[in-house]
Image: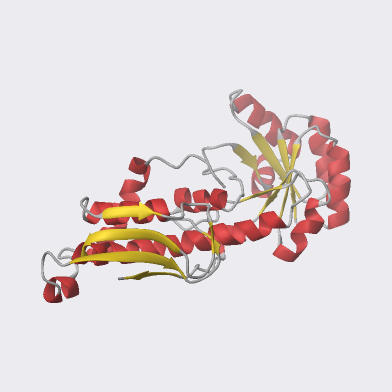
């Protein structure tokens, strides 16, 4: 899925920290010991599984941060479909530099490609409906930006990036504040006209109360049965954006999408990931 990439400078800190973690204070001891300076090679990042690629922008940054003189050519960009055996990237130059950047490039590429591939599988289940698949805040600490980008590469959409993005009222907020009416009225008084207010409910009775108050922009129907989701969409009747969440397994997505919800949020996209197997070969 094509869209504008995140600017490189926003990703540089992640790459620098990751390289410091791998190289420590002295660099790659093995390559320094056994590979003479000036040894030039061409390397390829190869796909060993089929799926959707993500993390190639980060791979390029990894190699160029180690050695700006490396020639890096991305053959299959982020969001592209790949099959086993495809060459995704070519890197030419100093062999020691390529090996220093290799592990960070592959670690990030493999994880993010796994996210993009899983997302694409979920998105495929919504075909023929208006429903969009979206991620959650259940991301790896420090990797939220790139994991959410990987969801986009797989054809999904992004939920809020943090607690500062929007006002999202959950069950604990309601319990602490007193009632649905109380939390919604306080949220509206606090929020600017640019802030979206979403509220989570887990019963149709709560949904009815939300509709009567009439302040929320979005409602999250949490852990509801498919018949209740269908009824909930009917009750809202276009007055709010409707999101479904909770226990959203791949085999259930088509059924949930058929209820007419606008979004299905899936925590598993970023918290239960199988890496896509990528390798680097000289």
Residue at point 32%, 47% (across, down): 12
Q: Is 124 on the left-hand or right-hand side of 230? A: left
Q: Is 179 on the left-hand or right-hand side of 78? A: right
Q: Is 55 on the left-hand or right-hand side of 208? A: left
**Spot occupied by residue 28 in the image (x, y as percentages of width and height):** 19, 69
Residue 224 in view: no
**Spot occupied by residue 26 in the image (x, y as percentages of width and height):** 15, 65
Residue at point 60%, 29% (across, down): 195
Residue 191 in view: yes
**Spot occupied by residue 120 in the image (x, y as percentages of width and height):** 62, 57
Q: Quadrant of residue 194?
A: top right
**Spot occupied by residue 188 in the image (x, y as percentages of width and height):** 66, 27
Q: Nearer the viewer, residue 159 or 80?
A: 80
Colour scheme of the picture: secondary structure
Residue at point 26%, 52% (across, down): 64
Q: Quarter holding the C terminus?
A: bottom left
């Amino acid at each position: 899925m094509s869209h504008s990439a995140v600017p490189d400078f926003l990703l540089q800190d992640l790459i620098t920290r990751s390289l410091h973690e791998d190289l420590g204070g002295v660099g790659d001891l093995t390559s320094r010991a056994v590979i003479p300076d000036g040894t030039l090679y061409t390397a390829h990042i190869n796909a060993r599984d089929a799926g959707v690629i993500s993390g190639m922008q980060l791979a390029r940054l990894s190699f160029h941060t180690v050695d700006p003189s490396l020639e890096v050519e991305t053959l299959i960009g982020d969001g592209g479909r790949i099959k086993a055996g495809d060459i995704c990237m070519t890197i030419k130059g100093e062999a020691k530099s390529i090996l220093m950047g290799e592990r960070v490039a592959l670690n990030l590429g493999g994880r993010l490609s796994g996210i993009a591939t899983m997302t694409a599988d979920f998105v495929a289940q919504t075909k023929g409906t208006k429903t969009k698949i979206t991620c959650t805040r259940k991301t790896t600490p420090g990797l939220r930006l790139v994991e959410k980008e990987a969801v986009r590469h797989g054809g999904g959409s992004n939920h809020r990036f943090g607690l500062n993005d929007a006002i999202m009222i959950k069950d604990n907020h309601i319990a602490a504040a007193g009632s649905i009416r109380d939390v919604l009225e306080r949220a509206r008084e606090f929020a600017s006209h640019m802030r979206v207010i979403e509220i989570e409910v887990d019963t149709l009775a709560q949904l009815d109360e939300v509709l009567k108050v009439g302040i929320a922009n979005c409602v999250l129907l949490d852990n509801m049965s498919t018949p209740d989701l269908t009824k909930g969409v009917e009750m809202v009747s276009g007055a709010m954006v409707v999101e479904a969440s909770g226990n959203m397994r791949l085999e259930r997505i088509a059924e949930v999408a058929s209820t007419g919800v606008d979004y299905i949020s899936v925590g598993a996209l970023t918290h239960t990931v199988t890496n896509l197997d990528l390798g680097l070969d000289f």
